[in-house]
Every structure is written in C-alpha cells, then in structure tokens.
Amino acid sequence: MRFIIREQDSEKLLAAGLYSYQHKNQPTGVTEEWRLTEVLGQYRILRTDIDERESRSNQSTLFHLIINRDNQPQRLKIRFFSPLSLGWADIMISEDGIILSQDFGHGRIETEAEFDASVGFLYSSVTWLGMWLSHQRIQPASKLYYLSKNDQFELIESSSSFQQQKGKPVRVGGRSITTNHYSLKLSDKKQDFWIDSFDLTVKAALSKDLTVEETRYIRQM
C-alpha cells in the first residue's frame, strides 16, 4: 500500500482491508486498499490507496483523512497520479467552512464553501462512505458536499437521503460477517452498502453493474 504520510509510532491500528471493484461480476483491475488507525485516543486517520493502474484509466489516487471523535472529517490530503496528469489537493473542514486548495500543474486554486456539523462530506472511498452512512443514524445530514474530479477536484452540493434495510451475512475471507444494509441516494443516483458492526463497509453496489467486494479484512477493535 502507498501512503501520503506513513503511520507513526503513536498510531494504533484499528482495521485494514482491500476491496476489489467488479463490473458485471468481472474484475475491473481497480482496487481500494485502506488502513484505519487511532492516535492516542484523540482522533483517527483513514489512509486509502485507490489503485487503477491495471484498469483502462491507468491512474491512482491516495487519500489521508483525519477524523475527530464525533466521526467528523477534519482534514483530507489527496495525491493524484496518471500518465497525463499529476496533482494534489488539501481540504480543511471546520465549522467555519471548507477550504479546498489544489494544484494540477496550472497553479494553486482555492475554493471555499459553508460547512457545519449538519453538513455531510463524501469522497470516492468506499471505506469512508460506510463510516459516514453509519453516523447518519445519529445525526442525519441536512445537505452534503461530494468531492468530484474531472480535470481537477470540485465540491458538488447534493441532496441526499438514506434508508436502513434488513442486512445479511457477507462472506469475507472464509468467514461470515453480519451486516446492516443501507441505501444511499445522491441526487438521482442510488447506491447500496453492507456495513458491519464496526461501521466498516464489507460490500457495496455503486450502480447496477458496478460492485465492490472486500477481499481482505482485519480488525483489532
């Protein structure tokens, strides 16, 4: 797994895993490897490596997310690599707002948006999507921002709704894991997630044909 910032001695590993993205039950070549750690009982760090080098896109995105005790994101660092483009982004999140700074070779660009505890923040990590969805049982978001990427990253304001349904056991690495089933609707796009008792995604259906399966999963919580 590749990192933006490597784990430090002060961090305790909570869980780690590897997802495989499949199109119509066939591997796409895209994987998402992740590690969740805790720092001195104060906050958690979610590191994610979305590796698309074996797929048509031939690109990679690394994420480094700091999460506070209330499961609120505080800071997200991103590194993006492709044969045609290199870039970085740094997102600061607080009750004062969101500040998105980024540079894809054309100079630094800064964007600001309003934010408070009632606003959700999502990006393209199945791990974070599951953690965020589980928290919606406690404090549903009134609106949310989704981090989208075309030539550069963009904060997209979106309506959302979610529904908890009856879960099912999901097999990962030869063992059966009990899950809760959540359906998330972003604007007009519906996605389904199967999340375990530790608020971690073990399976997802991102569209009719695109699914995500956990192929390796350890937890020490």
Image: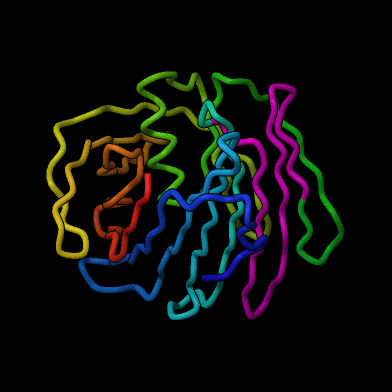
Q: Horizontal and vertical percent for residue 21?
A: 34, 65
**Residue 11 magenta:** no
Query: Residue shown at 21%/64% (left/top)?
Result: 173
Query: Residue shown at 48%/72% (left/top)?
Result: 52
In the picture, measured across the screen, residue 182 lies left or right of residue 39, that is left
In the picture, measured across the screen, residue 29 lies left or right of residue 125, that is left
What range is drawn magenta here? Answer: 72-101
The majority secondary structure of the magenta stretch comes to strand
**Residue 81 magenta:** yes
Specify the farthest residue to the right: 107
* Foreground residue among 34 and 30: 34
Q: Horizontal and vertical percent for residue 150?
A: 61, 58
Q: Quadrant of the C terminus?
A: top left
In the picture, measured across the screen, residue 150 lies left or right of residue 50, that is right
* Foreground residue among 54 and 198: 198
Height in image: 2 above or below 134? below
